Amino acid sequence: MKSKPLKPATVCATLLSLALLSGCASLNPQARFEPLQAQSQKLLQQDLQWARTPEQRAALDARVTELLSAPLTAERAVQVALLNHRGLQAQLHQLGIADAAWVQATRWPNPGLSLGRMKRGEELEIERSLHLNLMAWLTSSGRGRAADLELQALQRNLGQEVLKVAAEARHAYWVALGAQQLQQYSQQVLEAAQAGAELAQRMSQVGNLNKLKLAREQSFYADAALALAQAEMASISSREGLIRALGLWGEQLALLKLPARLPELPAQALNQPDVERIAITQRLDVQEAKKAAEASAAHMGLTRSTRFINVLELGLASNRSNHEATQTGFELSLELPLFDWGEARVAHAESRYLQALERTAHIAITARSEAREAYAQYRAAFDIARHYRDEVLPLRKRISDENLLLYNGMFIGTFELLADARAQISAVAAAIAAQRDFFLAEATLQQALIGPIGSPAAPRSASSSSSSSAADASGGH
């Protein structure tokens, strides 16, 4: 007697019923991206887009071209970076990877089907069983919660990356604009030095100027030429830094135009005595640390609940023989905690949780300190730039005006007037650098209130080398 084979319709119906019961989640990476868009609008007031198709990439390129059609501002530079930075776009694709992993983690495990055929003499026995990983089913909600927390952690990490790209673009913009203005001023200094050197040469040829004064004028011209070369090198370097921060290439390079000079200082500096509270409330790294601690706590609870039973399977069996009646029943298998009682897993989870708590405290302390420091640097940079604008430069101009009156009255000669003009060079170059440093400090403060401060955190160090190049021409004269 032959046994009836297992009907495919029965198997399909059983698996379909299990699939419907599992409530399978669907892939939706765009939904994972929308919180990042909302965050960009809230914290940066800028639009963030994710190019997932060639058509979307072409649309972003067209918008970048439109943004580059006019001289760039700091805010437009941030917008270009958020749309055009390929490194950021590459990291956004992690959302698609994480979304697929989340869907996989939240779906119930597939059931297993086993078939067996055994023969003994004339007796033919067919075994059929359908088994499920019962432990995976019982802990599916916990695994789904853990997967959801991991996805949220990725979103927060990408949120910090968005802020980092924006901060680098803003920092690179102010450095490039300041270097361009210093280069233009160095060019003016060189032209004045060249005129003075030519005048000194002609006067020396007719015997109206001694060799010492001639050498001084020629030395000043040589120093001015060197200062211009250094300023040009700094301008090229900073412009390339801006290009990298914005992700520009190809025809976009020719479209990049900067304003002629730095904007004027604001009438008043920001008054934010509660920078610590703002930083703790808004900073993404603090929020990420808190959520990581919560995820560790959830993982620790799941580990404790499954410390004794880590493997539990339920199976349905059906044995059919041509000599005996069909046997049906179920099988339940579990792991016996004879050697591993799960205390190591619990201790591991507890240590991870305590580590997350300490890391949260450390990040909060660092955030408070960075906010205080950034605000102090911002106020100091504003006071320094304002001092140059309101005190130093007006005094230098007053001195220049008085010397011009003395020159018109023939109380001083041409070279005394040129010497006074050279004395103004260092003051003007320092004023430009101080004005740039203020906008760098303002950008650092904005970053310190919403996210961790990265490499462009010290505006003073960024300005020290380039601010001296235009002033070197006046040294010793």
Image: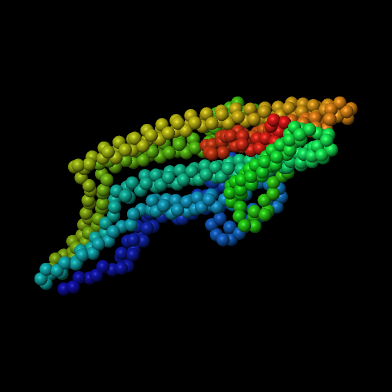
In the image, is residue 336 above or below residue 416?
A: below
In percent of the image, x 28 and y 68: which residue is there? 7
* Residue 146, percent from left and from top: 39, 44
The chosen color scheme is rainbow
The answer to whether 234 appears left or right of 114 in the picture is: right
Left or right? Give the position of 205 relative to 455: right
Q: Is residue 459 visible?
A: no
Residue at (47, 33) in percent of width and height? 363
Quarter of the C terminus within the rendering = top right
Q: Nearer the viewer, residue 287 or 430?
A: 430
Q: Is residue 456 visible in the rendered structure shown here?
A: yes
Pinpoint residue 327: horizontal percent, then vertical percent: 18, 61
Q: Quadrant of residue 362?
A: top left
Quarter of the image with the N terminus is bottom left
Residue positioned 77% across, 39% down in the render: 197
Q: Position of residue 164 (x, y in %)?
A: 55, 42
